[in-house]
Image (cartoon, grey):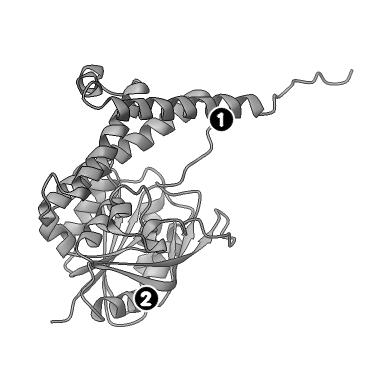
Amino acid sequence: MPSTYSFVLLSYNQEEYIADAVRSVLDQQGPPLEIILSDDCSTDSTYQIMRNVAAGYTGPHRVTIRRNETNLGFVKHFREVFTRCTGDVMIVAWGDDVSLPDRALAVREAFSSGDPWLVHSHAACIDLAGNDIPPTYLTADLVKGSDLAACATSGGLYLGATGAYHRKLVQKYGHVTNPRAYEDLVYGFRAMLEDGVRFIDKPLVRYRVGSGLSTSHLLADRGGKRKAEIRRLRTQYAVLSQRRRDALVFGMFPQDSIPQLINHNRLQVLFELYFWGAINRERARRLLFQHPLLALRAWRRVRRFKRRIKRSLQAMPTTVAVAPAP
């Protein structure tokens, strides 16, 4: 039986870009789609712009516009929309990106040519002003063609803005519940477990760098860099914990190589959080004596990071106030 398709656009406080994003979804070529435009209770005019653009649509797709009553955050918003979709496959777009007109058609072709669980593609990267820039995602493991072991501990699997997901990813493994575990880092690993990843070797999205959830911003002060690193480590710990559970659901045993590799990396992240002073110290102390080499490695990583922060701050130019000429 042929798969059915839902095209979902998720937005939050993206009033500057949302009109182009909505138009790009409505302009998708091919058979009719279920389209869901979903806003996560934006505090700006994103939702109203979304409604205004969709109001004049007269094409073949079936369009639903919705808004969360409260801000759910990324993971809960994604889960909420996933449960509302009726399609077997959910093609995901974001409120600051632009989907090319043939994206849905290319995704349909990829899903119909085999039995994939996840499909992703290349993207054309643009800056905040819409100018083309070099791609930023080519080192991601599923783009490079890495194996399962590399993907098990990877912090970048593919460009999430290009993802399309089969419902089986949730039917078998369940929804992601930790608000720090992003869907691309979880679903990509699940699809690798099932040998169900397909890559479309052409750009299907204009991906805006500098405005999304996963963009790393330069932080000038020491406290900001510390907070950003702790946030990254907490995300990594949440993702690794989810991947370990998923490996067991797949049928692996805790003593198998992949769950052991994930747990090894998870412990090191836990120790790094400990040395940043970001977790309950009693919890980590009990593990320090069981895994002294991992703890030492984590301490060295944190020390190197702190030194890099210090050097970068020392290298920053100092602003000197100049008195106006008399």
- Foreground pick, 295 / 279: 295
Asked if residue 227 lies left or right of residue 246, the reply is: right
Q: Which residue is mark 1?
A: 220
Mark toward the viewer: 2 or 1 = 1
**Quadrant into which the N terminus falls:** bottom left
Using the rendered view, name the quadrant where residue 107 is placed: bottom left
**Residue 73 % position (x, y):** 29, 43
Say which quarter of the image contains residue 145. Answer: bottom left
- Look at the image and tell me in which quarter the C terminus lies: top right
Q: Secondary structure at mark 1?
A: loop
Q: Is residue 140 above or below residue 34?
A: above
Residue closest to the eye, 309 or 74: 309
Question: Which residue reaches farthest right?
Answer: 326
Q: Residue at x 40, y 52 (%)?
A: 46
Q: Is residue 155 visible?
A: yes
Gap between marks 2 and 1, in whole Å? 41 Å
Q: Tell me the crowding category of disc 1: few under 14, some 14 to 19, or many 20 or more residues within 10 angstroms, Cα based.
A: few
Q: Is residue 69 visible?
A: no
Residue 263: x %, y % from top left:
22, 40
266 vs 159: above or below: above
Q: Which residue is mark 2?
A: 28
Q: Nearer the viewer, residue 69 or 275?
A: 275
**Mark 1: which amino acid?**
Ala
The mark that comes first in sequence, 2 or 1, is 2
Q: Residues within 10 Å of mark 2 (few under 14, many from 20)?
A: many
